[in-house]
Image: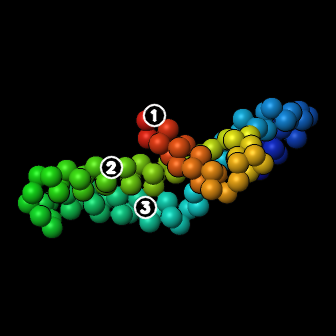
Amino acid sequence: MKAGVRATKRLDHRLSEEELRTLKVQVMPALPRIILGVLGVTAGISAAWGWPSDSNMVQGCLGAFGILSTLFGIFGVRKTIGGIADAIATEGVTDLVGSILGSIADAVDF
């Protein structure tokens, strides 16, 4: 976000409130994303090797968990600044967590 603001300063273009509200920012910090990615890759490998169980259902669940965890680790959770500001102003903390989880589900849908 800082790089975008600096670029607009160089171009002598001030960002409007609407442009700022449409910017997407990373909500999930780097360390949990790295842990989630490593966990996802590990789960995928263990599902492919059939560890800890040879059951197809367990392998399928581990594989699905591995794919989803890896995707969240790579892409993280991005949310628009306007959505974050509106959620904080009108909904409160509990609903903010719900809206972040909803944006995670939207990110998976592609």
Q: In this figure, which residue is indicated by the disc labeled 2? A: 67
Q: Residue at x 38, y 63 (%)?
A: 38
Instruction: Kindly give the residue lying farthest to the left in the view shown.
Output: 54
Residue 30 falls in image quadrant: bottom right
Residue 1 pos. (x, y %): 73, 47
Q: Report the label total.
A: 3
Image vertical order of residue 30 relative to residue 56, above or below: below
- The amino acid type, in three-letter code, at marker 2 is Ile
Residue at mark 2 to residue at mark 1: CA–CA distance: 14 Å
Callout 3: 10 Å neighbours few (<14), some, many (20+)?
Answer: many
Q: Earlier in the sequence, mark 1 or mark 3?
A: 3
The image quadrant that residue 5 belongs to is top right
In the image, what residue occupies the spot 57% across and 50% down? Answer: 98
Give the side of residue 53 with respect to residue 72, left or right: left
Tell me which amino acid carries mark 3.
Leu
* Mark pair 2, 3: CA separation: 11 Å
Residue 20 lies, in percent from the top left, at: 79, 38
Q: Residue, x 44% and y 66% (percent of image)? A: 35
Q: Give the residue pinned by disc 3.
A: 36
Q: Is residue 67 left or right of residue 47?
A: right
Helix, strand or loop status at disc 3: helix
The reply to whether residue 85 is visible in this rendering is no
Q: Can you identify the residue that label 1 sits on?
A: 110
Q: Is residue 44 above or below residue 108?
A: below
Q: Answer with mark 2 or mark 3, whichever residue precedes in sequence.
A: 3
Residue 13, horizontal then vertical, whole percent: 88, 33
Helix or strand or loop: what does disc 1 sit on?
A: loop
Q: Nearer the viewer, residue 69 or 5?
A: 69
Asked if residue 83 is positioned above or below residue 28 in the image, the reply reads above
Residue 10 pos. (x, y %): 87, 39
